Amino acid sequence: MKLHLLELRAFGPFGDTETIDFDALGAHGLFLMHGPTGSGKTSVLDAISFAIFSTVPGARRSQAERLASDHARPGVTPEAALEFTVAGRRLRVTRSPRYFAVKKRGTGRVQRPAKVLLQERTGTGWSTLSTRADEVAEVLDELIGLGAQQFAQVVLLPQGEFAAFLRAKADDRADLLRKLFDISRFSDLEQWLVDTRRCVRSAIDAKDAQIRTAVVRAEESLVDLAPQIEQWRELSVCALPTVIESTREHTSERLTHALAATDATSAALDNATQQVDRETTLARLQQQGARAGQVWQAWEEGADQRAALQQRLDRHVRDARAGGDPRTRACPRP
C-alpha cells in the first residue's frame, strides 16, 4: 500500500484546508514528520486511519465524535480525503464524520450524518465505486487485508503504540505478520520439519523397541556370564572393549565346540534312529514268522484228524453208491 495525497478540511486541529503530498515527500527516500506537541502530527495519522476505516487508532477512538475542528468557519463540512494505491489499484476515499452544524435558520445546532465516497482512478478520470459505508468497508478490507487495529499497529504505530504490538500475544502477532508478508515457504518448511520430526521419532521409537528386545535376548543368552558381567561394572570404560573382546572370543570358541558337539550328537541320533528302524523291522518279521510257525504246527497236528475224516468221507461215498442213491450214481457214457 502506498499513500499519495491527503487532504484535510475542518478536521481535528486543522480549521482550514491542508494538503500533504506524500509523493513529493518521499521522492528522495525517507521523510520525517516532526513538530511541537499539539502541532497536529497525530491528527495526520488519525486522518489516514479515519479515511480508510472510519475510526481513529488507540485511546483516541472514543473521541471519534469530536473529529470536526472547533476552529473551522461555520458551514464548512469536516472531511478527510486520502488517495493511495493498493493491489495495483489507485483509489481515493473521502470521508466526513458525523458532526453538529449550526442551523442556517434560527438558533441551535443540527446533527449531520457521516458520509463516504470511494473512487477509483481510470483512464478517463475518477469513477465512483460506492457511497455506502458497508460496501466501502468490504472493498477496502478485501484489498488491504488489515483491520483498523492491525493497520494502526503495523503501518501507523503512533506515539509508542509499537510497544502495544510487541506486548500482543504471539498468535496475534503471527497472524498479523502472515497477512503482511508472504511466509508460505517458511510455513511449508515448518510443516516439513514437523512431519520429519514425527517420522524420525517413530523410527527412533522402533529402533528403541528393537534394542530393548535385543537386550532382553542378550541377557537371557548371557545368563551364565552374570558373575562376569557384574565384574565388568567395576571396570573403567577404557578397559571394557578389551575385556569384552576377550569374552567374545572365549564365547565364540565355546560356541564352536558346542556346535561341533551338536553336529556329533545329531549324527549319532541319525545312526540310532536308523538302528531302531532296522531292529523294529526285524522284530516285526520275527513276529510274523512266529505266527506262521504256529499256523504250520497247528496244520501238522491236525493231519491225523484230517485223515480220519477223509476215510469217513470215502466210506460214505461208497455206501451211497452201493445203495443206488441217484445223486452218487455214475452217469452213463454216450
Image: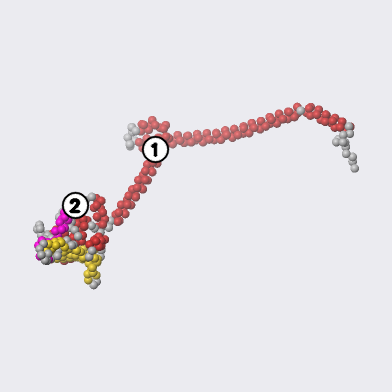
Q: Position of residue 175 (x, y in %)?
A: 26, 54
Residue in the foreground of this view, choosing between 143 and 1: 143
Residue located beneath label 1 in the image: 215
Task: State which quadrant residue 312 falls in.
Answer: top right
Above or below residue 134? Residue 221 is above
- Left or right of 204 on screen, residue 299: right
Q: Residue furthest bottom?
A: 124
Q: Residue furthest front?
A: 106
Q: Amino acid at mark 2?
A: Ala
Residue span colored magenta:
58-75
Q: In terms of secondary structure, where does tag 1 sit?
A: helix
Q: Position of residue 116 (x, y in %)?
A: 20, 64
Q: Amino acid at mark 1?
A: Val
Residue in the foreground of this view, choosing between 303 and 234: 303
- Left or right of 77 on screen, residue 289: right
Q: Residue drawn at (68%, 29%), measured in percent from left and top? A: 290
Above or below residue 209? Residue 306 is above
Q: Residue drawn at (25%, 53%), measured in percent from left and top? A: 174
Question: Where's the C terminus, which quadrant?
Answer: top right
Q: Residue drawn at (18%, 52%), measured in percent from left and top? A: 163
Q: Is residue 184 visible?
A: yes
Residue 74 in magenta stretch: yes
Q: Position of residue 21 (x, y in %)?
A: 16, 66
Query: Badge 1: few (under 14), some or many (20 or more) residues near its Cα, within 10 Å?
Result: few
> Which dot marks residue 164?
2
Question: Which of marks 2 and 1 precedes in the sequence?
Answer: 2
- Which of the two discs, 1 and 2, sits closer to the camera? 2
Task: State which quadrant residue 83 falls in.
Answer: bottom left
